[in-house]
């Protein structure tokens, strides 16, 4: 049997980016992808589980994207990581459960053969507060988090003209880790994804996922939040830079409705990706994030990302609320 890695590189030339889930939060996208130290709802479970420690209430989140991904050597392919659902999760300060589709495409090659490929990531997050009833307190500055992940992949190929067809599937596992230091109004974070992450295929072969790392910080100054980070992927000498800011000065109806605005940039090689977004937060229970971004303004297509959060609010308690979240 042909080695599955060769098949992936020849028949299905997935780039390393196919294994990087898109930023699940529209708010994170709008802030240029500066997410590793960003207090958020959908982002922490996937990129820095240590940030889950900041959550005040449990929530569910679902993300959508309008982007259509183009893969080198292939026609434009629809992808769950690029169109449709990008994230589904449930989280509390004690941990999270999440699903993130890494890649899902069905396309026809030049020789009329058809290829279908799919990769999904399922995870459970643990935090420094897992198993504890007490939420985050001011005297706890160092926080940690980890993801335990399960992968499922499937590749199918069919060529009716040559009467050829095959299908193979694989299962895998991996880990993510994150460490955060916070001292109001500053948060410093470092996180690593896909540690010891591998997929074992039915024929005995295995594929190794690329490791990624992020180092970042965020700073809150009155109604402004600033965030920045450096991302290291397969080429550590060419990191990706993320910078974003958010202004949360719009309040309606005695703080029942809040409308923060975001702006960000991402610098990768010589490409500049510009992004912007808006959040509609109603009564701290329903949050709707909408982000727009483009990699070559003004001629490029403007893509959109939407994230919906439903906070499962509890009765108000006399607990510490991290100033960065105000």
Image (cartoon, rainbow, N blue to C red):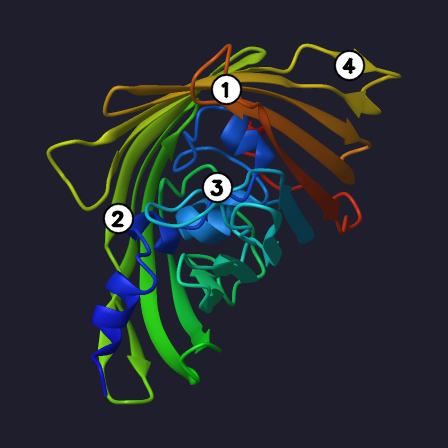
- The numbered mark, 2 or 3, whose residue comes first in the sequence reads 3
Disc 3 target residue: 23
Q: Quadrant of the C terminus?
A: top right
Q: What is the spatial separation of the Cα atoms under label 4 and label 3, in whole angstroms?
A: 27 Å
Which mark lies nearer to you, 4 or 3? 3
- C-beta proximity under 8 Å, tags 4 and 3: no
| x 23%, y 71%: residue | 5
Element type at mark 4:
strand
Disc 4 target residue: 251
- C-beta proximity under 8 Å, tags 4 and 2: no
- Residue 223, compared with residue 302, is above or below; it is above
- The numbered mark, 4 or 3, whose residue comes first in the sequence reads 3
Label 2, residues with CA under 10 Å away: few <14, some 14-19, many ≥20: some
Please state if 164 lies on the left or on the right of 236 as rendered.
Answer: right
Disc 1 target residue: 300
Element type at mark 2:
strand
Disc 2 target residue: 212
Which mark lies nearer to you, 4 or 2? 2
Q: Residue furthest right?
A: 253
Q: What is the spatial separation of the Cα atoms under label 1 and label 4, in whole angstroms?
A: 33 Å
Element type at mark 3:
loop
């Amino acid at each position: 049997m042909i080695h599955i890695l060769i098949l992936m590189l020849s028949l299905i030339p997935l780039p390393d980016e196919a294994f990087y889930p898109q930023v699940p939060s529209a708010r994170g996208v709008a802030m240029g992808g500066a997410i590793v130290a960003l207090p958020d709802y959908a982002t922490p479970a996937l990129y820095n589980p240590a940030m889950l420690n900041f959550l005040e209430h449990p929530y569910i989140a679902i993300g959508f994207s309008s982007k259509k991904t183009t893969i080198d050597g292939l026609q434009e392919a629809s992808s769950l990581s690029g169109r449709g659902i990008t994230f589904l999760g449930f989280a509390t300060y004690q941990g999270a459960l999440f699903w993130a589709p890494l890649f899902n495409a069905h396309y026809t090659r030049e020789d009329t053969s058809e290829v279908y490929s799919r990769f999904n990531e399922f995870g459970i997050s643990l935090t420094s507060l897992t198993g504890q009833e007490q939420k985050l307190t001011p005297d706890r500055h160092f926080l940690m988090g980890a993801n335990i992940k399960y992968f499922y992949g499937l590749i199918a190929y069919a060529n009716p003209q040559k009467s050829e067809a095959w299908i193979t599937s694989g299962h895998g596992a991996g880990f993510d880790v994150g460490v955060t230091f916070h001292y109001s109004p500053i948060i410093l974070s470092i996180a690593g994804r896909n540690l010891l992450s591998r997929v074992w295929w039915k024929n005995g072969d295995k594929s190794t996922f690329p490791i990624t790392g992020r180092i970042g910080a965020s700073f809150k100054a009155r109604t402004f939040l600033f965030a920045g980070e450096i991302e290291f992927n397969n080429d550590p000498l060419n990191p990706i830079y993320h910078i974003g800011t958010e202004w949360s000065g719009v309040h309606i109806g005695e703080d029942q409705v809040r409308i923060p605005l975001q702006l960000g940039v991402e610098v990768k090689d010589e490409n500049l990706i510009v992004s912007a977004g808006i959040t509609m937060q109603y009564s701290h229970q329903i949050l709707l994030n909408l982000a727009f971004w483009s990699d070559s303004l003004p001629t490029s297509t403007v893509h959109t990302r939407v994230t919906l959060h439903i906070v499962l609010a509890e009765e108000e308690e006399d607990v510490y609320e991290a100033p960065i979240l105000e």
